[in-house]
Amino acid sequence: MSSETPSIGRPRAFDEETVLDLAAEVFWRHGYEGASLSALTSAMGINRPSLYATFGSKEQLFQRAFARYHETQVARARAALEQPTAYAAIEAFLRSSAHGLTATDHPAGCLSIQGGLACSPENARVSKILAAGRAATETAVEERLSRAAKEGDLPDGMDTRALARFVMALTEGHAVHAAAGASCDDLQASVDIALRALALRT
């Protein structure tokens, strides 16, 4: 990977997906506002002119990095929703999330939580980007549960929207605890209690 500034007509000498992954890790560790351009360019192995030429701005870089994060990290948890029953889908989603939040190959917690829940007014768009990402995942959970309701796989009268929000609130809370040092076993113990409380098995 080269840190040289690409000249006009010359292909960029770095892989964009790789540098986006590296940028996402910086935003993940420090949040949007805490991630300095120096930290970003150092982690990405490129200089500022290359960053601006390729991504446009710090905010545009964040948008691209977060989209890449969604494709890689969040997609794993969402894939768990393809389990054959609502109970199995929720369990797989929660357990997959717990593993992902505490994995050792990236910062603990979740970029969509740590990236910028609170931002200054000039960076309010960043909080909206993250909120939209969480909402998309919640919608995927709700759609899976709505399908289960139509199939008779949920108790009569179950509010699938509220259930989806409960599932998301648990994973988002787990993200906060994981960032503070909670282990995978700690999170899985919470999942055990949540599943007993749900009692969706019929």
Image (tube, rainbow, N blue to C red):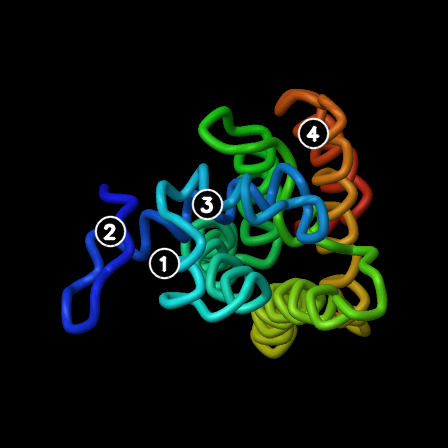
Image disc number at residue 41? 3
Give the labeled residue for mark 2. Answer: 14
- Cβ atoms under marks 2 and 1 closer than 8 Å: yes
Does residue 32 appear left or right of residue 10 in this picture?
right
Sequence-first disc among 1 and 4: 1
Q: Secondary structure at mark 1?
A: helix
Residue type of the residue flagged with mark 1: Ser
Q: Residue at x 39, y 49 (%)?
A: 47
Name the residue beneath numbered marker 1.
Answer: 50
Dots 2, 3 in contact, CB < 8 A: no
Residue at image x 45%, y 28%?
105
Quarter-wise, where is residue 28 in the image?
A: top right
Is 202 displayed left or right of 165 in the figure?
Answer: left
Residue 54 placement (x, y as % from top left): 36, 66
Q: Earlier in the sequence, mark 2 or mark 1?
A: 2
Tell me the distance, in whole angstroms, between the alpha carbons under discs 2 and 1: 10 Å
Residue 45 percent location from the top left of the image: 36, 41
Determine the CA span between mark 2 and mark 3: 13 Å
At label 1, counting other C-alpha atoms closer than 10 Å, the crowd grade (few under 14, some 14-19, many 20 or more) is many
Residue 80's place in the image compared with 53, above or below, is above
Q: Quadrant of the N terminus?
A: top left
Tell me, yes or no, whether the two marked residues, 3 and 4, touch with CB atoms within 8 Å: no
Q: Which residue is mark 4?
A: 187
Residue at 53% x, 59% y: name it. Answer: 66
Element marked by disc 3: helix
Residue type at mark 2? Phe
